[in-house]
Image: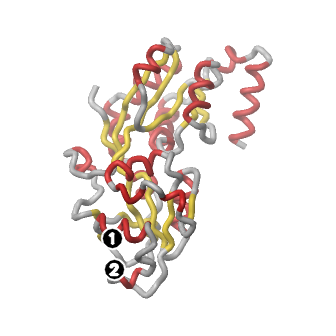
Amino acid sequence: MQKAVFFLLISCFSNGLWSQAKKDTLFIDGSNGVKPLVEAVAATFQKNYPDIKVIFGEGMSTSARIEALQAEEIDVAMASHGLDIPRFTKQGLQVDWFAKMAIVIGVNKEVELKKITSQQLCAIYDGTITNWQTLGGENKPIQALARPSDEVDMEVLQEHLPCFSDVDERSFLQFHQKSGPLAQALSNTPGAIGMTAAVRQAQSEGKIKPLTVDGIKPKLKQVEKGKYPFTRNAYLIFKGTPDPVLKRFLMFFNSKTGQKILKANYAVPIEK
């Protein structure tokens, strides 16, 4: 239903009715890894401002989201990690770095393991270790989940663990293009291990267990102190000067209330 409403409003734009629809509607699309955080803030924002509707798309590639911003098909693009901010600025876009979030190495709730070393993680993902019994768990096969190497979660892991540099060539891995389906597979697949955003792990209702990596837990304080290695930045990108609706949303997003919501969803707000 939400998708139908989104495309109906896009159709209104093509018929010259965009300006009328935009007065009380905010369209957001982009990174699915950042989406759960923005959705959490938006949910409270809409309770406080019921006259404004926030509509989320289903995800866009980096180039597609920028093209959509420039064409004013969306109001805000969600993005993560490795942005060329000066280039966007030259294009008339503004970038708001609002949070840092942990990428969790998680396992299905049935896996007994609580911690793992980088060496063991590499051995799982290169196919050397294939059973949890090898690491002190049950005699159960390991199903390693991954995202393509050009996706943010994998790029972050590759920065710290070179053993992830050629994962695309490993046929025994189960790949997921988007972070949502990977988290769902991690929740539902016995013996599974994979990488997911801390907010998705927290929202899994215990179906995904976070692993301590090299003795460091993926906790908010460890991310704040810079001790936990696997983190990604979260950004909001918009075009030009915000209209009143977007300005109200951005002010709420960066308010104490917005930052409290980010922390409740295991992200570290960036001080402005």
The answer to which of marks 2 and 1 sits earlier in the sequence is 1
Lateral position of residue 19 relative to residue 15, left or right: left
- 2 vs 1, front mark: 1
Q: Which residue is mark 1?
A: 120
Location of residue 147 in the rendering, given as x and y in whole percent from the top left corner: 52, 55
Question: Which residue does the numbered mark 2 point to in the structure image?
Answer: 135
| In front of the other: 51 or 166 | 166
What's the image's color scheme? Answer: secondary structure
User: In terms of secondary structure, where does tag 1 sit?
Assistant: helix
Q: CA–CA distance between discs 2 and 1?
A: 8 Å
Residue drawn at the location 38% of the way across and 48% of the way down: 156
**Tags 2 and 1 touching, CB below 8 Å:** yes
Residue 98's quadrant in the figure?
top left
Residue 23 appearing in the image: yes
Who's the residue at 42% across and 47% down the image?
Answer: 155
Above or below, comparing residue 209 to residue 162 in the picture: below
Instruction: Name the kind of residue labelled 1 in the image.
Output: Gln
Vertical order, 116 against 100 (above or below): below
Q: Which amino acid type corresponds to the residue marked 2 in the rendered image?
A: Leu
- Give the residue displayed 40% in from the left and 80% down from the top: 132
Q: Percent position (x, y) of residue 128?
A: 41, 75
Q: Which mark is residue 188?
A: none
Q: Position of residue 272 (x, y in %)?
A: 28, 25
